[in-house]
Amino acid sequence: MLFRSLRLAVALEEWLAALNPFEGLRRMEAMLAIDASAPDDLRAHGVRVLGGARQLSGDQEGAITTYEASLELFLQIGDELAAAELMHRLALATLYVGDTQRARALNEEARVASTRAGAGARHEALGVRTLAQIEGEEGNIERGLELNLEAARIAREVDWTWWEGGALTDAALYAVKLGRAAEAEEWAREALALAHQIDDAQGLVYGLGLLVATAADRGDVRRAGRLWAAVESLESSGRPIGAWLAWGDRDEIAAALPMDDPEFDAARRQGRSLAVPDAVEFALSTPSE
């Protein structure tokens, strides 16, 4: 029964990540602790899922340690393809703890390993988006934006909706930093639609937050206020949006909002009456609608 549950958790990894990585973390820790006798390949995948849950829950150091354990298991059983994917994940987690130099080296190592293992476009999308974030962290925002759009295109071709939405979100973030509000709004709206499609709370709050930023940038304080109320509703909903709260993007957007503007405040209070799905529908409409 344990093995059946563990196999199901591995199969539903992306769904658990989008819906609630904290719950996924709790369940994977429990399942892997109950019995260490699972077959090596299943245990390797289970430890990988555990690492992903730790990463999405904000524990990057724990994710690195867990990914390294999973990588060792995959290498022991000779699964080069899975090992290559773990290298991509390690690169991203290493980036999130601030070591861009090592992240870049790991990402290149992962690219080579993926090519050697005959990996397809999914691995390419992993590597390109990771490189985009490395470039962004090193101040190369324009290059990071270009790479995010490339990663989104590759993910779209293989129907990897979650990764496509994340890449578009990152592209919109970079566009905001570059003062390209119109493009940021386009990509944020696309990302929000994808997050809504798969019920990804993290994607929803980022998409809404970015559309707040672009509305405020063009002086549409009423729209910005209504959308900010939806962001606050998601923040108080208990849904897993740890990255939004922890990585500074929320504070950067909030600092630029006209919080003391009576029109913004009135729209914000009005927006609190909207359920999140209705707020998303409003956000996906064009400003003239």
Image: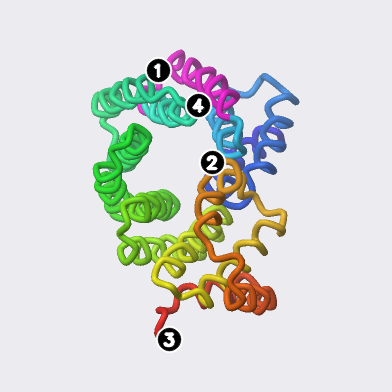
Residue 249 visible in the picture: yes
Compute the Cα span from label 4 to label 2: 11 Å
Instruction: Name the kind of residue labelled 2 in the image.
Output: Trp
Q: Residue at x 25, y 24 (%)?
A: 112
Say which mark, if any, is on residue 247. 2
Compute the Cα span from label 1 to label 3: 56 Å
Instruction: Name the kind of residue labelled 3 in the image.
Output: Glu
| Quarter assignment of residue 185 | bottom left
Q: Residue at x 39, y 30 (%)?
A: 88
Residue 124 visible in the picture: no
Task: Describe residue 257's horizontal placement relative to residue 181 as left or right.
Answer: right
- Residue hosting label 3: 289
Q: Residue at x 72, y 23 (%)?
A: 35
Say which mark, if any, is on residue 216. none
Local crowd at mark 1 within 10 Å, few (<14), some, or many (≥20)? Answer: few
Membership of 3 in magenta stretch: no
Q: Which residues are magenta?
A: 60-81
Instruction: Name the kind of residue labelled 1 in the image.
Output: Gly
- Residue hosting label 4: 97
Q: Nearer the viewer, residue 229 or 191?
A: 229
Q: Residue at x 51, y 65 (%)?
A: 196
Q: Earlier in the sequence, mark 1 or mark 2?
A: 1
Compute the Cα span from label 1 to label 4: 29 Å
Compute the Cα span from label 4 to label 3: 42 Å
Task: Describe residue 124's horizontal placement relative to residue 164 as left or right.
Answer: left
Q: Earlier in the sequence, mark 1 or mark 4?
A: 1
Q: Identify the main secondary structure in magenta.
A: helix
Does 82 sit above or below residue 237?
Answer: above
The x, y position of residue 180, in whole percent, is 30, 59
- Residue hosting label 1: 78
